[in-house]
Image (cartoon, rainbow, N blue to C red):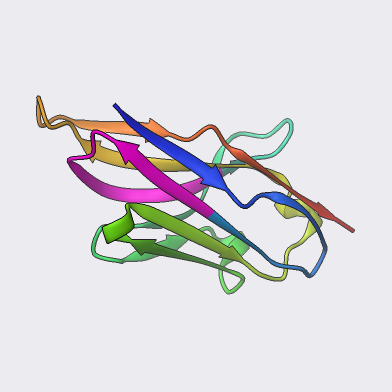
Amino acid sequence: QVQLVESGGGLVQAGGSLRLSCAASGRIFILNAMGWYRQAPGKQRELVAGITRGGTTNYADSVKGRFTISRDNAKNTIYLRMNSLKPEDTAVYYCNADRVDPGTYRNLEVWGQGTLVTVSS
């Protein structure tokens, strides 16, 4: 099993910054693409930013220029630097990873438990 543990959420004023971390642990064989999703109350979960093992990134239009995703493969960890936060960024942020199972070589998906980010106006 592989676990993802997020940290770094909290309450921040509009215009402020936060950095989220997501560390993978457990029976890690290969971690491919990883990313951050968020879900606001009453809304569907949406992709915020993704990063491949090689470092290629993609972002939701709503966060381009404000958020930066990065990755440390040696630590099996990804980060999300969030600047110029807005009240509409308030959501539970989830970490996601595509992993290869060492026993079956199947591609599986794993999710973290989520971390709450609240941006006050």
Q: Position of residue 106 (x, y in %)?
A: 15, 29
Outermost residue on the right side: it is 121
Secondary structure of the magenta portion, mostly? strand
Q: Position of residue 34 (x, y in %)?
A: 36, 49
Q: Position of residue 22 (x, y in %)?
A: 46, 49
Q: Residue 119's image quarter?
A: bottom right
Q: 109 or 79, which lies in front?
A: 79
Q: How many marks do you count on the picture?
A: 0
Image check: 34 left or right of 116? left
* Residue 51 among those drawn in magenta: no
The quadrant in which the N terminus is found is top left
The residue drawn where x is 77% and y is 61% is: 86
Image check: 15 left or right of 111? right
**Above or below — where is 80 with respect to 5?**
below
The residue drawn where x is 17% and y is 40% is: 29
Image check: 119 left or right of 100? right
Q: Position of residue 42 (x, y in %)?
A: 73, 30
* Residue 28 among those drawn in magenta: yes
**Above or below — where is 93 with respect to 75?**
above
Image check: 67 left or right of 71? right
Span shown in magenta = 21-37
The residue drawn where x is 57% and y is 47% is: 7
Q: 27 or 71, which lies in front?
A: 27
